[in-house]
Amino acid sequence: MSGSDIFGIVGSALDAQNARMGAIASNLANVDSITPPGATPYHAHEVVFEAAPVTGAASDMGVQVAGTVQSNAPAVQKYDPGSPYANAQGYVTGSNVSQVSEMVDLIDSSNSYAASVAVLQQASRIDQQMLASFQVSA
C-alpha cells in the first residue's frame, strides 16, 4: 500500500459513513410519521456496506455503499381515536423507526467518521514530516 492509497481508503470510509448518517437523518425525520389506514407506513432505512477496491489495486480494499434495505421491524400501532388517520378500532399506524436505536447508530457513525478524519490527519502529518526530512538545510 502506498501513502496515497490511505487517502483513498479513508475517503471511501468517510463517504460510506456520510451515506449512513444521511439515512439516519431521514429515519429520525420520520420517527413520528403516521399513515392513513391501508397505506404503507415509513420503514427505517439501513445502509449496507461492502468491501471495494480503491485506486484500482485489488489489495487495497476500502468500503462502499452496496445499497439500502428497509427495516423489517413491525410498524407501531398507537391508540389515538381522535386522529383523522385512525382506523375503525382507533389505532394509528406509525413508522417502525426507533429513535433510541437511531441515536445509537448516529453516535457510532459519528465516531467512525471522526476516527477516519484522525487517520487522514495523521497520514498528512507523516507525509509532511517525510517531505521535511528530505529538505536540505542551508
Image (cartoon, rainbow, N blue to C red):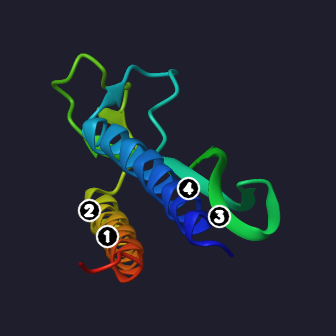
Residue type highlighted by circle 1: Gln
Between the residue at mark 1 and the residue at mark 4, the CA separation in whole angstroms equals 15 Å
Q: What secondary structure is marked by label 1?
A: helix
1 or 3: mark nearer the eye: 1
Identify the residue at image location x=71%, y=54%: 55
Residue 71 in view of the camera: no
Q: What secondary structure is marked by label 2?
A: helix
The part of the image, by quadrant, that contains residue 33 is top left
Asked if disc 1 and disc 4 are in contact, CB closer than 8 Å, the reply is no
Between the residue at mark 2 and the residue at mark 4, the CA separation in whole angstroms equals 23 Å
Between the residue at mark 1 and the residue at mark 3, the CA separation in whole angstroms equals 18 Å
Q: What secondary structure is marked by label 3?
A: strand
Whichever of callouts 3 and 2 sits on the residue coming sooner in the sequence is: 3
The count of marks equals: 4
Whichever of callouts 2 and 1 sits on the residue coming sooner in the sequence is: 2
Asked if disc 4 and disc 3 are in contact, CB closer than 8 Å, the reply is yes
Residue located beneath label 2 in the image: 103
Query: Is 110 displayed left or right of 116 in the figure?
Result: left
The part of the image, by quadrant, that contains residue 2 is bottom right
Residue located beneath label 4 in the image: 12
Residue located beneath label 1 in the image: 121
Looking at this view, is 43 or 39 the one in front?
Answer: 43
1 or 4: mark nearer the eye: 1
Between the residue at mark 3 and the residue at mark 2, the CA separation in whole angstroms equals 25 Å
Q: Which quarter of the image is occupied by the C terminus?
A: bottom left
2 or 1: mark nearer the eye: 1
